[in-house]
Amino acid sequence: MSKANERELRVGIIGCGGIANGKHMPSLAKLPNIKMVAFCDIIEERAVEAAKKFGTEDAKHYIDYRDLLKDDSIDVVHVCTPNRSHSEITIAALKSGKHVMCEKPMAKTYAEAKEMVETARRTGKKLTIGYQGRHRPESIYLKQAVENGELGDIYFAKATAVRRRGVPTWGVFLNEYEQGGGPLIDIGTHALDLTLWMMDNYKPKYVVGSVYRKLADRENAANAFGSWDPKEFTVEDSAFGFVVMENGATIILESSWALNTLQEGEAITTLCGTEGGADMLDGLRINGEKYGRLYTTKPNLDVGGVAFYEGHKESPSNREARLWIESILYDKDPVVKPEQAMVVTQILEGIYKSAKSGKPYYFDEED
C-alpha cells in the first residue's frame, strides 16, 4: 500500500439527522482510511446515538459545532445540517483547517456560496457538495459519452425533478427559513447539477422563473410520506425555470413535490446536441442518426451478465464518499468542484428572484 493508503483521516459529523444516517455515515464506515471521531447535533441524543453506532470507542459528541471544530486532530468535516447553516458551518470548518463535504444545496444564497468558495481557496482546504446523482451508473456512462463527443454541441437540455405526490413531511423541509425554498432547492438542485455537469457549461446569462404554491393548503392530501400540515408548509410545491446560457444554450428546469402529472422523474436529465441526444426517462437512452437512419440505444448498465454472478456493485453514495476521501489522500480535485455547485445555487436563486419580480433575472446584474 502507498503512504496515502496507509494514512488515516479523522472525520467529524455535524448534523446527525436523516441524510447523515442514511448516506454519509454508512458510506464512510465502509472506508478503511476513515475514523469517525466526533459527532454534533443540536439534539444531543442524536449525536450520542451516532457516536455509538459509527464512532470510535473514544468518539466525542457535541451540541455546538464550534466545540467540535476546536479539535485540531480532525481532518475532515461533513456538514449535514439544514440549508440555513451550510455556509456558516462550512466557512468556520475551513477556517479551522478542515476539509469539508457539505450536503446539497451548497447554500441558501449565491452570496453565501461565493463566500464558501473564496474561503476554500484562501485556506487551501478542499470543499465539495453532496451531489451523489453524478455517481449513478447511467450518469457515469453518459458523462463518458458526452466527453467523447457522441452528442456533439449540447444546446438544449431539460433538468427534471418531478414528483406527483412526494412532499417530505419530516425534518424542516417545509420551513422556508431553514431551507430557503421547497422542491426547487431540495431536488431541483440535483437535476440542475447533473445537467450543467453533463453540458460542462457554467456560464448562465439570464433566467425566467415561475414558482407555485397551489396544492400546499390541502388538508389530508394523498402523499407518499403521509399527509402534510398546511400550516407548516411555508415553501413552494413546484417551481420551473427557463435558463439561457451565455453561449446560447437553453435549459428547462422542472421541479415539484406535488403536481398533477403522470410524467414523473427525479434527478434526471435530457440532452440534445448536434450529433445526438440522450435522456433518462426510461433508463439511459442515447439517440442519433447514422447511415441515413435514426437509432436509439439503451446500454446495459447491470454489473452482472454471467450466470450465478452479480458482480461488484458500488452504490452512488459509497462511490461519492470513496472518491471524496481519495481526493484528499491523493490531493486531487473532488468530483463536485465548489465552483460548479456555486453556479447551481446562483441559478436557483435567479429562478426565485425572477418569479418574485415577474421579470427575467440577468446574472450580469450581480455584484
Image (cartoon, rainbow, N blue to C red):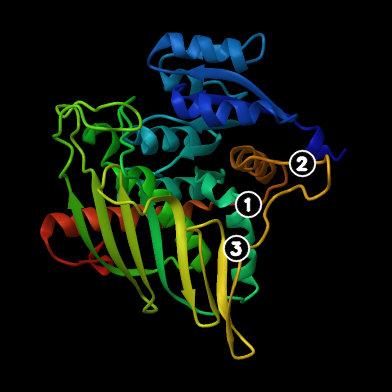
Residue type of the residue flagged with mark 2: His
> SS for tag 1?
helix
Residue 318 in which image quadrant: top right
Which labelled disc corresponds to residue 312?
Answer: 2
Task: Tell me if mark 3 has few (under 14), some (14-19) or many (20+) residues whose alpha carbon lies within 10 angstroms of its own.
Answer: some
Residue type of the residue flagged with mark 1: Pro
Precedes in sequence: disc 1 or disc 3: 1
Residue 179 in which image quadrant: top left
Task: Give the x, y percent position of residue 63.
Answer: 41, 14
Which labelled disc corresponds to residue 137?
Answer: 1
Residue tagged 3: 143
Using the image, determine if residue 173 lies above or below residue 194: above
Which labelled disc corresponds to residue 180?
Answer: none
Using the image, determine if residue 256 lies above or below residue 299: above
Out of 350 and 18, give the one closest to the viewer. 18
Q: Tell me if label 2 and label 1 are in contact, CB under 8 Å.
A: no
Residue in the picture at 27% in, 53% down? 349
Residue type of the residue flagged with mark 3: Lys
- Tell how many labels: 3
Task: Tell me if mark 1 has few (under 14), some (14-19) or many (20+) residues whose alpha carbon lies within 10 angstroms of its own.
Answer: some
Residue in the picture at 27% in, 41% down? 182
Cα gap from disc 2 to disc 3, whole angstroms: 21 Å
